[in-house]
Image (cartoon, rainbow, N blue to C red):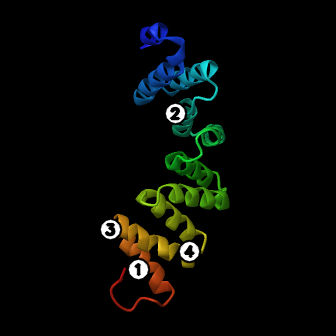
Amino acid sequence: GRKAVELAPKSVKAQALTNLGVVFEKQEKFDEGIACDREALEFDPKYPDAHFNMGLMLTKQGKSDAAIACYRRNIELVPNNARVHGCLAEELWKIDRLQEAVGTYRKAIELNPKWAVAVKRLAELLQILGRPEEAIPLWRKHLELEPTAYAHASLGALLRRKGQLDGPIVL
């Protein structure tokens, strides 16, 4: 662990520290992991993995505002990472910044149209927000990507509510 970081050349110290932080994260030693990521950022303030991994650990600690800041910084450095946009959207949802979460999920899906989890989460959020006309096509897309009973039931309930279901669901 720490010895490998000490022996690492300066050019890869940030990566070595972030990797050590991941080890701590897997052991659920989040404070130690976050400390490694902070130290990594002292070597390279623009190392995106350190920002992202720190965001994940802050999320697990329930520190949404700090996690959001980490995800946003990662997005500044690497704007086309769908996973980071998805994590940011989840945190925004947790703190009731729902409209912002919708836009962030949309960006995640734009970056990775086959990411079934993001499609499902956006459909769920739009359904909660009372926007079935936007949720229905997303449930259909989710069923194409990952046909689950939950997605069938969710789509069926929306269609029934809108009076558009009088037989089996057709994709």
Which residue matches tag 3? 147
Mark pair 4, 1: CA separation: 14 Å
Foreground mark, 3 or 1, reads 3
- The image shows residue 28 at horizontal and vertical percentages of 44, 29
Q: In this view, does 110 lie above or below 54?
A: below
Which residue matches tag 2? 53
* Lower position in the chain sequence, tag 4 or tag 3: 4
Mark pair 3, 1: CA separation: 13 Å
* Lower position in the chain sequence, tag 1 or tag 2: 2
* Most foreground residue, 28 or 5: 5
Judge left or right: residue 126 versus residue 24: right
Q: Quadrant of residue 70?
A: top right
Could you tell me which residue is drawn at 61 percent across and 69 percent down? 129
Name the residue type under label 1: Gly
In this figure, what is the number of numbered marks? 4
Q: Is mark 1 on a helix, strand or loop?
A: helix
Which residue matches tag 1? 156
Q: In which quarter of the image is residue 31?
A: top right
Name the residue type under label 2: Asn
Could you tell me which residue is drawn at 52 percent across and 73 percent down? 135
Which residue matches tag 4? 134
Q: What element carries label 2?
A: helix
Mark pair 2, 3: CA separation: 31 Å
* Lower position in the chain sequence, tag 2 or tag 3: 2
